[in-house]
Amino acid sequence: MANAEEKTIDVDSQGRMILPARVRERLGVKRGGRVSYEFENLTRLVIEAKASKNVEERVETWASLARSTQAQILGERSVPSSSKWMNQDYVRRKLGLQ
């Protein structure tokens, strides 16, 4: 078990607390990441990792790319008549393109 000193965080002259690297790693928080906090009683602060805005931006970028390339994905090229290929109408619905 870690001693009490290892579980403390210093507060600087401007009242800011810096989460140590080992805490950020355990929470999975990277640079630019987000955390939420909540008070339990008057002396306990609970910090939880939140989804990074960067992840949300990457998902939106991917979705935009998928929507913009629908002609290439679902377009005019012929699709082999193999059992591993899906019906184009099904794919359009699943991708939200219809």
Image (spheres, rainbow, N blue to C red):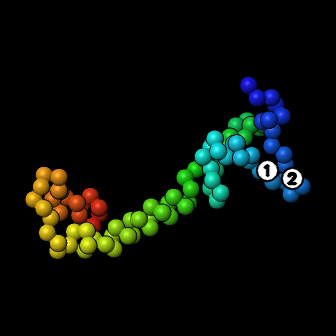
CB atoms of marks 1 and 2 within 8 Å: yes
Q: Which residue is at a point 23% across and 63% down the rendered structure image?
A: 92
Q: Position of residue 40 (x, y in %)?
A: 70, 37
Q: Give residue 12's mark.
A: 2
How would you rate the neighbour count of disc 1 (Cα within 10 Å): few for under 14, some for 14-19, many for 20 or more? Answer: few
Asked if residue 48 can be seen in this view, the reply is no
Residue identified by numbered label 1: 17
Q: Residue 25 vs residue 12: left or right?
A: left
Q: Please identify the residue farthest to the right as the structure is shown.
A: 13
| Position of 6 relative to 63 (above/below) | above
Quarter of the rendering occupied by the C terminus: bottom left
Viewer-closest of 95 and 23 = 23
Residue type at mark 2: give it: Asp
Q: Which residue is at a point 56% across and 56% down the rendered structure image?
A: 52
Q: Position of residue 61 (x, y in %)?
A: 44, 67
Q: Which residue is at a point 22% across and 60% down the rendered structure image?
A: 91
Residue type at mark 1: give it: Met
Q: Residue 42 vs residue 61: left or right?
A: right
